[in-house]
Amino acid sequence: MRSLSRKRFVAVFLACMTVGGVHGQVKTLTILHTNDMHASFMPHESYRVKGTPRPLVGGFAELKFIADSIRASKPATLMLDAGDVMTGNPITERVYGGAQGGALFAMMDSIGYDVWCPGNHDFDVSQDNLRALVRIATFPTVCANLVDTVGRYPVGNVPYVILERGGLRLGIIGLISQELYDLVNQNNLMGLRVLSPVETAQKFIDELKPKTDIVIALTHQGVDEDSQLAAGVHGLAIIVGGHTHTRLRHPKLVDGVLIVQAGSNAEDLGELDIAVEAGRITQYDGNLIPLWTREKRPPSSVSVLADSMQREIDREFDQVICMLKGNWMRSETQSAIGTFLADAQREAAGAEVGFMNNGGIRRDVLAGPLTKKALFEVLPFRNILATFQLTGKQLRNIMVYDVAKKPGIQIAGMSGRWRRRPDGSVEFTSIEVGGKPLDEGRSYACAASDFFVGEGKKYLGEEIRIPVYLKATVFEAVEKIVRVRKEIVPRVSDLIERVP
């Protein structure tokens, strides 16, 4: 294998098309690919561009236009998606075709996707909803290492498909992250098992090799894991990946395997051109095509449905629910937005201490009118608010764990002062809950999302026992608090401070 310049590759690519047509020796293929679109079906500001005004990028209408343009000039084209279609926009709350977020898959049908592999966020609503989404899609769902307790494929997935393009037989295997249980509300994963990606891939590569010209892995596990997969198997040609939102401007080559990934939020379309001879990729070229929004595009089935869904969302979500008197900016340490979200959960649940994981805060918000849509984009997950009891001793241990391990959480209702002992360990000199000294002998009511509860050991260093799940989602609970406040002055409170 060797990489070619774009200009040189195009010449070789066209020459290969001619040779393949006459002699049947060299065949060419174009793979178009996306990943982690997160319901970004409409154009949005490009945050990669510094300064204002920022240009608009993305959206399914532009994606379809560019994909159709490429297919018109390169008939042997395959279009793949590597998961996380869901979560990030209120369209995932709207029922279409019998599924929440179903309009996304109806639009993907119109765009012309051939195959997809689910990602962790495609489970965010429920297993049943994912099954309904799979039924809407006319293109197959591949995921070889996602099975139920008796080894069946549980959400309408199949381990692989074999497709033919341009005279090439293509085996496409799906793989999902083995860390799925650390990424999704565990209530949504009941009865599911995730098998080893490397072992599963090799099993099906061996099955596919005699039947195909090349084998492709369509994965949702991240670039590092894709690199380990490439190094851990034999007989694989290409990995089309997702999960880490990595913008690989050009393919990454690991042990002879091409790895591609196209960022996130439908801002880029990945394009990989290959020439294949005798079951080997002899030339390749890959790049990302930025999907800058152009207003003068002809209407299409995608744009008509997208505009219709956006009008419905605007009617409900464009309403201003509060005035934000300062910026809400995320941080790995205690932040104003994190403080507010943890405190709102505490207040909504009638608890004394509230917790929020940093990874659950999905965007910053600038000062000004706060819309329901902006708040939803901060909290797009369908996590349920939960309460649980922790002893004062457990709370002290949690404070020590937070300082020592930095698990990435926000805490409201509890503050403390700590110092480093000569041996390097952490000692709290004082801890207060609700402004009163911590009583290690009593129990305290705490609140967090059901996802947080399921990951209690990771975030708190403590297993959370016997949680009580409330009827409201975290977003619904926080929205009520925001509406009551009417005006929010961002502040960082409940500090965990180091003292000499």
Image (cartoon, grey):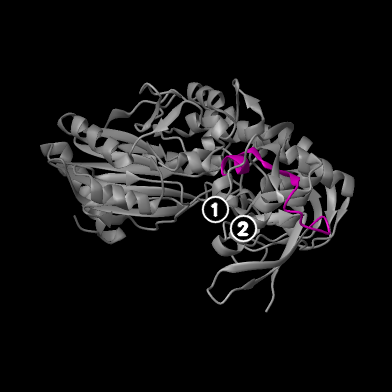
In this picture, is 155 found above or below 323? above
Residue found at the very far front of the displayed protein:
441
Range of residues picked out in magenta: 433-455
| Residue labelled with disc 1 | 292
171 or 155, which lies in front? 155
Examine the rendering and report whether any part of residue 293 can be seen.
no
Q: What amino acid type is highlighted by mark number 2?
A: Pro
Q: Amino acid at mark 1?
A: Trp
Q: CA distance from mark 1 to mark 2?
A: 8 Å
Q: Is the N terminus in the top left, top right, bottom left or bottom right quadrant?
A: bottom left
Q: Position of residue 292 (x, y in %)?
A: 54, 53
Q: Describe the element under mark 2 as helix, strand or loop.
A: loop
Q: Quadrant of residue 288?
A: bottom left
Q: Residues within 10 Å of mark 2 (few under 14, many from 20)?
A: some
Q: Position of residue 169 (x, y in %)?
A: 22, 32
- Kindly check if marks 1 and 2 are in contact, taking CB atoms under 8 A apart as contact: yes
Residue placed at 64% from the left, 38% from the top?
Answer: 450
Kindly identify which residue carries mark 2: 55
N-term-proximal mark, 1 vs 2: 2
* Circle 1 residues within 10 Å: few <14, some 14–19, many ≥20: some
In magenta stretch: residue 105: no
Q: Residue at x 39, y 46 (%)?
A: 241
